Image (cartoon, rainbow, N blue to C red):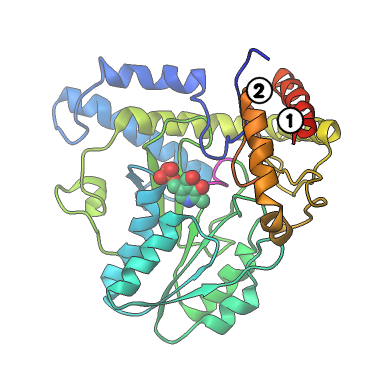
Amino acid sequence: MNRRVYLDHNASTPVHPEVLQAMLPYFSERFGNPSSVHGFGREARDGMEAAREQIAAFLKVSKDEIVFTSGGTESDNLGIKGVAAARRAGHIITSQIEHHAVLRTVQTLEQEGFTATYLPVDGHGMVSPDDVRAALRPDTIVVSLMGANSEVGTLQPIREIGRITREAGVPLHVDGVQTFGKVPIDLDGSGIDLLSFSGHKIYGPKGVAGLYIRKGTKMASIQHGGEHERRRRAGTENVAYIVGMARALELAYAEHAERVAHVSRLRDRLIDGIQARISGFPQIFNVALDVDGPARNYRDLAAVNKTRYVAFATALLRRGVRALERGAWFLSTAHDDAVIEATITAARAAAREI
Ligand SMILES: Cc1ncc(COP(=O)(O)O)c(C=O)c1O
């Protein structure tokens, strides 16, 4: 095989050529500092504010509710620590399967005196709304959950959870980094008060992201400096990348049906080709193979014979196919039929080897 195959497009995606084109002028002729009052600054600011308006329109929120950050990690930190800083003490609810950007943020807050409940998930990686209700306490200051489980693709029951948190008057933070631009979202109807999103999972650049903060949410800034982002996040904004993220989101919406159809078809073809198990989210393909019998759900997936899977992944890598060590393969629109064929050929050969 002479082409390299990368099956972890949930970790990152290549920048879309149209995203790159949209960004380029902001590295050269429109390079100004968006906080500057002169023409150079205004050009940069206009680009950034147009991007903010565009993202806000897609999310059906006000542009003043969007804060730009340096990544999904910072957005998660700002969402959770921002609420914590405004409240100074209290209890946080999250789940055991969150991204480190959330888990380690909550753990750090515990060291500072906050308390936390880490909810378990069921066999599909799903948080139970009843568990959220039971965990709520009078001193709970925020509930933070991811929109979709990034290993098996399970969409969390955010709408039901949002109803519970709204009733309790507790802000709901959703880590939407994996779902942004892929799964339609209704922030109002879902009772979401804070939403983290990031550019590089949808063919935008890395190192740029945002946080939606519902008007009225009690927050303090956690980074100090200038008065950028309406004093909620100090630091000169990464204008070119912000413009790129907005263009990436625009493309994601315009091509949504096409992308889902494309990825679903590739997934089915890959499954037919090497026989494995799938989950509900078309970008995500859980490879359990026949190592220890096919995995059916999250727990089974974790129980897959690791040594044999690693041997398999290593045999795949020798053939130019890089798959995720944990056994979930992530497809995206940037993959094509040739990639799937190459993967099937490599997987069949690798499976014979182990
Ligand atoms: C669910 C989730 N949250 C947060 C992050 C962190 O985002 P970023 O890479 O933009 O810092 C990721 C990235 O993989 C993620 O998948």
What's the magenta bit mostly, secondary-structure-wise?
loop
Relative image position of residue 318 (x, y in whole percent): 62, 25
Q: Amino acid at mark 1?
A: Ala
Who is closer to the viewer here, 178 or 349? 349
Q: Is residue 300 magenta?
A: no
Relative image position of residue 323 (x, y in whole percent): 62, 35
Q: Is residue 160 left or right of residue 92?
A: right
Q: Residue at x 65, y 25 (%)?
A: 335
Q: Residue at x 53, y 67 (%)?
A: 95
Q: Which mark is residue 130?
A: none
Q: Residue at x 54, y 44 (%)?
A: 180
Vertical side of 247 occupied by 236: above or below:
below
The magenta region covers 176-181
Tell me: is circle 2 under 8 Å from ligand 1.
no
Relative image position of residue 280 (x, y in whole percent): 74, 49
Which residue, given by chain and number where applicable, does mark 1 sit on? 350
